[in-house]
Amino acid sequence: MIPAAFDYAAPATLDEALRLLRRHRHAKVMAGGQSLLSLMKLRVASPSFIIDLRRIGRLAYVKEDKGAIAVGAMTTHAALAAAALVRRRLPALAQAAEAIGDLQVRNVGTIGGSLAHADPAADYPAVLLACDGVVVVRGPRGTRKVPAGQWFTGLFATALRSGEIVVEVQFPILPAGTRSAYVKMKHPASGFAVVGAAAVVRLGRDGRVADVRLAFTGAASHAFRARAAEEALRGQEPTEAAVRAAMARAPEGVDLLEDLVADAAYRAQLVRVYGARAVLAALG
Amino acid sequence: MAVSRLFGARVKRRDDPQLITGKATFTDDVTLPGVLYAAVVRSPHAHARITRIDASRARRHPGVRAVFTGRDLADRLAPMPCAWLVPGCELKVPRRPVLADDRVRHVGEGVAVVVAEDRYAARDAAELVAVSYEPLPAVINQEEATRAGAPRLHDDVPDNTAFTWTTTGGDARAAFAAADVVIHQRFTNQRLIPNAMEARAATAHANPATGELTVWVTSQNPHIHRFVLSIVLKMPEHKLRVIAPEVGGGFGSKIPVYPEDALVAFLARELGRPVKWTEDRRENYLATIHGRDHITDLEIAARSDGTLLALRGRTYANLGAYLSLAAPGIPTILHGLMLAGAYTISAVEYTVHGVVTNTTPVDAYRGAGRPEATYLVERAVDLVAAKTGLDPAEVRRRNFIPKEKFPYTVPAGITYDSGDYDVALARALAMVDYEAFRREQAAARKAGRYLGLGLSTYVEICGLGPSPVAGAVGFQGGLYGSATVRMAPTGKVEVMIGESPHGQGEETTFAQIVADRLGVPFEDVEIVSGDTARTPMGWGTYGSRTTVVGSGAVVTACDRLIEKGRQIAAHLLEASPDDVVFQDGRFSVRGSPDRSKSIQEITLQATLAWNLPAGVEPGMEATAFYDPPNFVYPFGAHACTVEVVPETGEVRLLRYVAVDDCGRVINPMIVDGQVHGGIVQGIAQALLEEAVYDRNGQLLTASMLDYAVPRAPQVPRMETDRTVTPSPHHPLGLKGIGETGTIASTAAVANAVMDALAPLGITHLDMPYTPRRVWHAIQQRGEVRP
């Protein structure tokens, strides 16, 4: 648990961080370090240079901005879980933040770090997808906004390009009457999501499901939207039976992960069960 | 004798403030001037021949002071010994070098050691040691390892079988012939990783002037460490001092003397500078012992009225790549002899094969053999109940050894000291409200919910133990308790014990005993342990022995001081010693309470020695060794309720009730703490923990990200109570409590889960009952829709 030697810088500004990143092509950007440091201690990762963002205070905020909840990349999970705006307008995000790791991890780990690391079992990705969120990155060629659906490209892989840093995450504020929830089965050891499900649901005037977006994390190499299940649920009465019936299609077409905790058949079941639990929790 | 004031009181643990506030000194906190750091180069292969080691790059790395390989040490250090040479089982102890010098036999085995000026340089340089391996086929499963054609680990261990041990008592053949019900079941007690919060560490310092070598080490038994290190280092014991500072949990994993302990001592002596090594968590998973790992075929013979007649079985015990210090005794003496549990089973026929495989060595882990036995017999009772249609509580009552039959000798030949099993079970059933739960369970089943209740009416052997028995069963040591009670001139008391408590609370409980016994303030008593230079020869802390055997020595030594004080008081008070009574810390003349002296006054007089009676030596110090006449046999009844969620296979623990009987209780708070921790570890075996290897011998659960150590939210509130059946042969009526929770709880949870799944026709599942495993089992029954 002793990392290999590395150089370290903790710039005070984002511009300085970006300059360092240009200069040290193999540098690794560190936000909260809750994943990176473990990998370094195991010597799975041995970056030669660490750019620590912790001194860049202006990257930690939660605010309402042009119809979205804008979250600074260095906002900790604990701060996000406690933010009144998030708890009121996007409960799924607060629930996901609260479900991460343990208190120590939540006090240090950040949303930007988590999304850049793209652990397939991280909690935020499901919420980001279900909410049609946007990841804002800054790089040598300025700022770019990446829609949630394009952010996750594979196992620990994202649309982040060399030289770029995640600076903000935007979650569109849901229209009144649209409700959200995030539920997960925790890995008994790591606390990561064996399967995590985020649901955003709106009922129409007729009391039927007018709109639903459902996304899963932990189940595949990266988070995904369960569009077939969404389709099956749209227009249905929001009964438990209807929700469960629609969830039969949730694992459709997905190459599910297999590990000691869950093989593919069991993960498919968890996708069905937790998908239903998320929708039902959102419906209240 | 004074009326007890502290015995039985909820006195807060004295060591907690310093432990909780981080002020305690653990081995890794011992940093000596000029210390060098060692890092071990470990095998990435489960089985391979070492063809070449090139350490030249490592030696050139900045800060590196030395590199030693296995071959460098082969003539310098003796092999690591095994110290439980169980007789009558054709035991073979393969050679285990401190560092592998020819072949590696498990992932994580040390092949070289690097010593450098700091930890980072040592670790970096360890990666520069180029070891060439020629991989060999590996074998992981102990049953497969005994088959013809399996890769052989050691030339002198044919069939990879280090021993085959059998216990027989009664006439099993006749019992099976007469049985109405015969059940066969294969069980596994899966491999567990002990996971002490503090990983292992060792620091050594050689004094060039005296030739004395001091070793600070994470040990449960520093005197055993000294004994063994003197053999490995080829160094006389009186030149070795072993200190176990605060130890952050052991659970058996810090009983063994490890290769790294010897390495650090050797390096300090060789290099003339202090040397330190601290294990990281990954090394802890690979190079510190594992526990359990049994595969058992068990046959149970019973009558249709639920009477248990006989057990017949065969266990393959995985010992790992080498025989760790106590390894042969765990699945035999501490396991096989306890197979009949709390029941009047008249015949037992049981064989245990101790098998070497290409895995981390297996040794004592909390309960050590007894949780495995309890799991087998308690599951057997429930299988008989299911087969005969009887209530599991009733089957237990019908088979309990009755109270009046104690001392009771079981077929395996050991004699239980005392017990009152019915009372403990009745109490547990009342606490869990057994009848009401059965009604709730029946109603829930109609509603498609699956509730279960499990009982575990365990008995265990502990308080290890009579030394002649230790010798007879091949334990290469004594097992008595030892204590020196030394009173300073002012009457303050130091108690040096040969046991080595590390969180079990004897710093507090022994001070309670001594303060009561000598009539001195609790604050005036200091309990000293963990240093071979300060404490009398003793055998350490494990096997729920410390309170039992240690207190025997402590009270004997106290009584010697009281007797001496009586002689001196009689002399000073001009009375006959027979007329001097000792009560509440005062010696007084019978009938003349005004003629008296306090024990502090007498101690001062004994220390000054100006006016002592003829034939009485100066000083107030006594040493006693207490060799118990028998083991002690705590028992109890645990009850657990669960709900299994069919759609996910999740097991929810609802309630956990524990009624334990450890004889008289010195400190109920500490007993509760021991029970709580034990239960959690036992629950973990039932629901969470399993060390998993792949076919090539790579540990797949090699970190806390993968291996599920229990967390607080995974454990229900525990409801504890006690019955009190004193041990008839112990001076204070004590029995041990350190392992009961672990011994009882795995079986209680297992029985609860199987009870919940019974309506689905599931009679057996292997532990741990993970959601995945339970869900698949339910799917295979096909009776519950997803």
Image (cartoon, coloured by chain):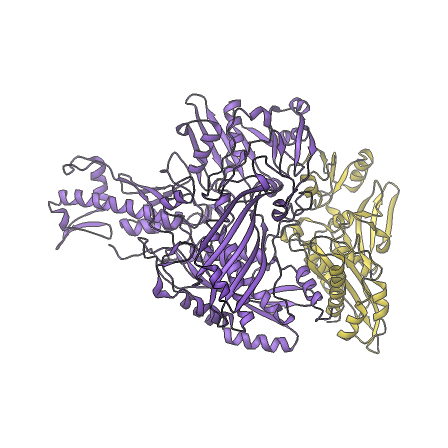
Chain colours: A yellow, B purple
Residue positioned 60% across, 33% down in the render: B110
The quarter of the displayed image where residue B670 is located: bottom left
Viewport quadrant of the C terminus of chain B: bottom right
Residue positioned 62% across, 44% down in the render: B145
So how many labels did they put on this image? 0
* Percent coordinates x, y for residue B468 in the rendering: 36, 44
The quarter of the displayed image where residue B626 is located: top left
Residue B27 falls left or right of residue B623:
right
* Percent coordinates x, y for residue A228 in the rendering: 85, 65
Viewer can see residue B144: yes
Q: Report the residue that reaches farthest toward the right.
A: A141
Q: Is residue A204 above or below residue B300?
A: below
Residue positioned 79% across, 38% down in the render: A16
Residue A125 falls left or right of residue B284:
right
The quarter of the displayed image where residue B279 is located: top right
Viewer can see residue B455: no
Q: Is residue B456 above or below residue A166?
A: below
Residue B759 falls left or right of residue A199:
left
Depth check: give the residue in front, B422 or B281.
B422
* Percent coordinates x, y for residue B757 in the rendering: 62, 68
Viewport quadrant of the N terminus of chain B: bottom left
Residue B639 falls left or right of residue B2:
right
* Percent coordinates x, y for residue B118 in the rendering: 60, 29
Residue positioned 71% across, 66% down in the render: B779
